[in-house]
Every structure is written in C-alpha cells, then in structure tokens.
Image (cartoon, rainbow, N blue to C red):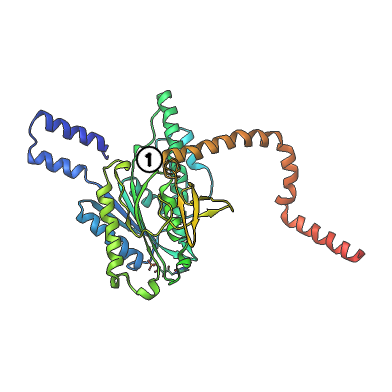
C-alpha cells in the first residue's frame, strides 16, 4: 500500500529533529517520496505522439522524477454508458468510485491515481482529439468531480463513515501534446482545447502544451529539434512543479499563442457584445479593439473561477444541485403525462407507419 506523502514528510521531520539522519534514512526517504510523471500516448505505437510524450518523460526523468509510459492505441476503452454505477458507488459509501465496465480503462485509471503529474499526447482526428481519449476522460473525470467528492467526504466525516480514496484529492500537474498531420492550423482547432478538458474534474494545473500540427510536412518530430525541445520543456516543467502549491507555479512551457490566461488556447465564444468567454475554461473577459488589433482583458476574479479550480467546480456542482431541485418535482408531477406523450417515441416504427398512412391519405385527397 502506498503511504500518504504527508506521512513521509512527518517521518522526515521527526528523523531530522530527533537525531541526525543516517545515509540509509535519507535513501529511504528520497526513494519513498519520489514523484511520478505519467505519460500516455493515444497515437500509434512508436509514431509521433509516442515519440513526443517519451521525449517529455526523458526530460522529467533527468529532472529527478520517476516516469511511467502507456500507449493506449490498442487498449479497449469503451465509452461511458451513463449507467450511473459510479454515482451509486459514491452514494452507498464506497471508498473507491469505479466503473461498471471492466476493460483496459482500469489500467489507465490506476496509473493516473498513482501519478503526481501527467503528460498526454494524442492525435487529431477530424479536427478534434481522437475519440479514445474522450472515452477515457468521460469515464474518469465527471465521476471524480473534486467539489462533489469534497462535499461527499464532509457528509461521511460527519456520519463517521469511511472517506473516499485520498488519491482523488491530490493536486496534480498536466501537460498536453496535440498531434496533427495538416499544415493548416484550423484542421487541428479542437486538438489542444479538447485535451485541456482533462484538467477540470481533478482540478489539475496545466504547465504547458505543444500544438504539433503540420506533421505531414515535418515527417517525423525527430527531424524538428525545436519541437522536440518544446516537448522536453513540458517534462521538465512537470517534474519541477510537483510538490509545489499551485499558486507558486507560474511556469508555462511549450507553445503560447493563446488568448486565455488559464488554458492558453486561442478560442473565444462571442455573443455579439464585448463580453467574450473562453469555451474551455468558462471564464469571461472584455474584448477591446484598436484598429486591426484586438485584445481581451481577463479579470482576476474570472481567472479564479476557471473550470479547473475548486471555486469553478463548486459553481457547477451547485448548478447540478439546483437543477435536481427543479427537475425532480417536475418529473414527479408530470409522470402520467410524460408516459402518455412518450408512447409515440417508444413505438417509433408504428408512429412512422401512421405518419406515412396519414400523408398518403392527405395526398390522395389533394
Ligand atoms: C481518421 C483520421 C483522421 C485524421 N484527421 C486529421 C485532422 O482532422 N487534422 C489533422 O491535422 N490530422 C488528421 N489526421 C492525421 C493524424 O493526426 C496524424 O497522422 C498524426 O500524426 C497521428 O498521430 P500518431 O502519429 O501519433 O499516430 C487524421 C488521421 C486519421 C487516421
């Protein structure tokens, strides 16, 4: 079993204050508190995503981290079926929140819980990130929403019940590499933004990303030293961030051509006013235009409520709670009405036959 990090620090403190540490003490302490950077590639084996994630891991290792690598391309990770099994795990007081489907998801899930930082590299398919990554995200993230789990733990503590797995509450750092073949950037437009969606539920802090598009002309990332350096910088940044509180880490590595100060992506939602929103982080900014130049000012209060922050997660948690309060009484009060109205949808084929017969009769009359 893994001993919590804090316990190691306490052990270290007591060794250092009560007696001089022996070299053996120090060796054990250093070995035990060693940080783990996990790398996952959702690309083909030994192709571009693999190479770039591994480059980041080499740098992380050089910076003192333990590293672990997974290629997921042949893994069987089915999509979330919304069966609610994970919510029931939480509601019945389980320590672990699992997924009902047993496939390769559990391998990546466990690797994630045991890491301190993660670098994910994935190919862009059809302008967005490969679906297997989204399957993994859908199964691990929403069920581990940190605000919801903090509330659950408060309830359990008050009732003297076993708390949830402490690994769900660990601060972790992330870095992302989006890999695309196209020369035109708009063909990878949703690559990095989709990768960043992994940050939210666990309230991870991202230290950098690399937008590795134009691979069709680059051929291999191994022929692009600048690109490989950016990937290595991600690994170094991750290893250097681990163990530090989020507010002490201001590093941004890799590419920085974005507009949002949190996710550094170049996307904006526009509603016809100067109030714009980062669709990835859900924060609002003020757009101003000066001739051909446009800029967005992002208030600190907005940055503090980005989707990957605890306040941001609580906003959504409360939103869901308030939805339930409205929705459940409405469904209960209208149960028979909904059942009656549902008949034509559940009997779809019959409804279609009726519509066809009605239309044919109308056409005959006309
Ligand atoms: C089904 C499919 C769709 C793709 N769609 C895009 C795309 O929309 N934009 C793009 O830049 N590259 C696209 N590509 C190219 C891949 O992103 C590119 O080959 C990448 O290097 C694959 O990552 P890997 O080398 O790590 O396997 C597509 C590839 C496949 C197989």
Front residue of 237/37: it is: 237
For the residue labelled by badge 1, is the local secondary structure a helix, a strand or a loop?
helix
Q: Closer to the camera, 208 or 51?
A: 208
Q: Residue at x 21, y 35 (%)?
A: 9
Residue occupying the point 78% across, 59% down: 353
Report if the beta carbon of the residue with label 1 is closer than 8 angstroms to ligand 1: no
Q: Is residue 115 visible?
A: no
Quarter containing the N terminus: top left
What is the x, y in percent for residue 335?
70, 37
Nearer-the-camera pick, 73 or 23: 23
Foreground pick, 252 / 128: 252
Can you give x and y, in whole percent of width and height, for residue 14 in the image? 15, 30
Q: Mark 1, residues whose alpha carbon is within 10 Å: few (<14), some, or many (≥20)?
A: some
Residue 315, position as x, y percentages in the image: 49, 38
Q: Where, quadrant-wise, is the C terminus in this rendering?
A: bottom right
Q: Residue at x 42, y 58 (%)?
A: 192
**Vertical placement of 189 versus 331: above or below?**
below
Q: Residue 230: give x, y in percent of width and height.
A: 30, 62
Q: Could one spot residue 197 in this view of the protein? A: yes
Would you identify the image quadrant in which residue 68 lies?
bottom left
Which quadrant would residue 56 be assigned to in this image? bottom left
| Quadrant assignment for ligand 1 | bottom left
Outermost residue toward the front in this view:
291
Q: Look at mark 1 in the image and give the residue it sits on.
A: 168
Name the image quarter holding residue 355: bottom right
- Determine the residue located farthest toward the right in the rendered image: 365
* Total numbered circles: 1
């Amino acid at each position: 079993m893994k001993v919590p990090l804090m316990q190691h620090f306490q052990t270290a403190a007591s060794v250092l204050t009560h007696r001089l540490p022996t070299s053996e003490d120090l060796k054990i302490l250093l070995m035990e508190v060693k940080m783990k950077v996990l790398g996952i590639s959702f690309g083909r084996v030994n192709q571009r995503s693999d190479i770039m994630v591994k480059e980041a891991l080499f740098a992380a290792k050089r910076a003192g981290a333990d590293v672990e690598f997974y290629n997921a391309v042949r893994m069987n990770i089915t999509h979330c079926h919304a069966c609610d099994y994970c919510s029931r795990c939480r509601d019945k007081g389980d320590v672990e929140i699992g997924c009902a489907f047993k496939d390769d998801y559990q391998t990546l899930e466990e690797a994630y819980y045991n890491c301190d930082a993660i670098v994910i590299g994935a190919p862009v398919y059809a302008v967005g990130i490969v679906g297997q990554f989204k399957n993994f995200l859908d199964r691990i993230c929403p069920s581990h929403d940190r605000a919801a789990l903090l509330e659950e733990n408060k309830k359990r503590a008050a009732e003297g019940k076993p708390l949830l797995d402490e690994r769900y509450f660990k601060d972790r750092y992330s870095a992302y590499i989006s890999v695309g073949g196209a020369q035109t950037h708009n063909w990878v437009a949703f690559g990095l933004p989709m990768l960043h969606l992994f940050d939210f539920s666990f309230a991870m802090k991202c230290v950098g990303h690399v937008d590795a598009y134009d691979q069709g002309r680059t051929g291999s990332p191994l022929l692009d030293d600048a690109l490989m350096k950016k990937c290595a910088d991600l690994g170094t940044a991750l290893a250097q961030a681990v163990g530090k509180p989020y507010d002490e880490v201001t590093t941004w590595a890799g590419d920085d051509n974005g507009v949002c100060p949190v996710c550094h992506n170049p996307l904006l939602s526009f509603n016809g006013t100067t109030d714009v929103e980062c669709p990835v982080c859900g924060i609002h900014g003020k757009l101003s235009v000066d001739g051909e130049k446009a800029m967005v000012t992002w208030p600190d209060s907005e940055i503090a409520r980005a989707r990957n922050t605890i306040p941001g997660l609580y906003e959504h948690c409360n939103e869901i709670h308030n939805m339930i309060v409205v929705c459940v009484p409405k469904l209960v009060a209208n149960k028979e009405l909904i059942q009656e109205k549902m008949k034509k949808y559940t009997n779809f084929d019959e409804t279609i036959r009726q519509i066809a017969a009605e239309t044919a009769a109308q056409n005959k009359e006309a």
